[in-house]
Amino acid sequence: MGRGKIVIRRIDNSTSRQVTFSKRRNGLLKKAKELAILCDAEVGVMIFSSTGKLYDFSSTSMKSVIERYNKSKDEHHQMGNPTSEVKFWQREAAVLRQQLQTLQENHRQMMGEQLSGLSITDLQNLENQLEMSLQGVRMKKDQILMDQIQELNRKGNLIHQENVELYQKVYGTRDVNRANRNSLLTNGLAIVEESHVPVHLQLSQPQQQNHDTPATKLGRLQLH
């Protein structure tokens, strides 16, 4: 058996009126909280009882909700008046120009320009920010290089496997384990290529080469 319909009118009995107020108030505040959480909405609810007691809920702060409401209400009224609408967009343009100027100043400071007005603390913060940015760039660069090396190793292994299969087709399986070496002489040096050995690349730091000057070579010849 379902619940009967309740006539929406003032409850004469004070006790029943207070009980209904308490239940409906809690339900309304609960629904407002659920609406704010589920829908990411900014919600503000204010309830005054018949005795003048205040009950409220706000997803952020009641002050910010009221300020946003008043601003939205003013903008709604101003949009109907051409003169007010022009003033509104003029204020918006002024705010955007100020933001653009601030971004341009920050960009010049990041480039090392217009640093005369900065204090030691400001310069230290700017230096720390640049160090963090540089560290992020280096990490991204190293990651890209490592990905490229892994891709080259993968392709090298595929080519090696194809060479092994081709070698099996040409020479047979009995010669698979033999090294197919080709010696090339370049500037008196022997370069040996082994087709059955895959090539593996890795990332390493550049090393300084030790170049002997002509005077050093001459000294070595005299010693010998």
Image (cartoon, rainbow, N blue to C red):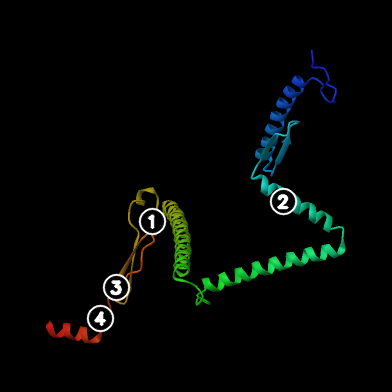
Q: Earlier in the sequence, mark 2 or mark 4?
A: 2
CA–CA distance in space, label 1 to label 4: 34 Å
Looking at the image, do the residues carrying marks 1 and 3 touch, with CB atoms under 8 Å apart?
A: no
**Which residue bears the numbered disc 4?**
212
**Which residue bears the numbered disc 2?**
68
Closest to the camera, between mark 1 and mark 4, is 4
Q: For this view, does 209 lie left or right of residue 126?
A: left
Q: In the rendered image, which quarter is residue 95 located in? A: bottom right
Amino acid at pointer 4: Asp
CA–CA distance in space, label 1 to label 2: 67 Å
CA–CA distance in space, label 4 to label 3: 20 Å
Which residue is nearer to you in this view: 34 or 29?
29
Q: Quadrant of the N terminus?
A: top right
Q: Quadrant of the C terminus?
A: bottom left
Amino acid at pointer 2: Arg
**Which residue bears the numbered disc 1?**
198
Q: Earlier in the sequence, mark 4 or mark 3?
A: 3
Q: Earlier in the sequence, mark 3 or mark 2?
A: 2
Closest to the camera, between mark 3 and mark 2, is 2
Q: Earlier in the sequence, mark 1 or mark 2?
A: 2
Tell me where residue 210 appears, x and y as whole percent: 27, 76
Say few, some or many: other residues with alpha carbon within 10 Å of mark 3 (under 14 / 14 to 19 / 20 or more).
few
Looking at the rendered structure, the secondary structure element under dot 2 is helix
Q: In the rendered image, which quarter is residue 198 located in? A: bottom left
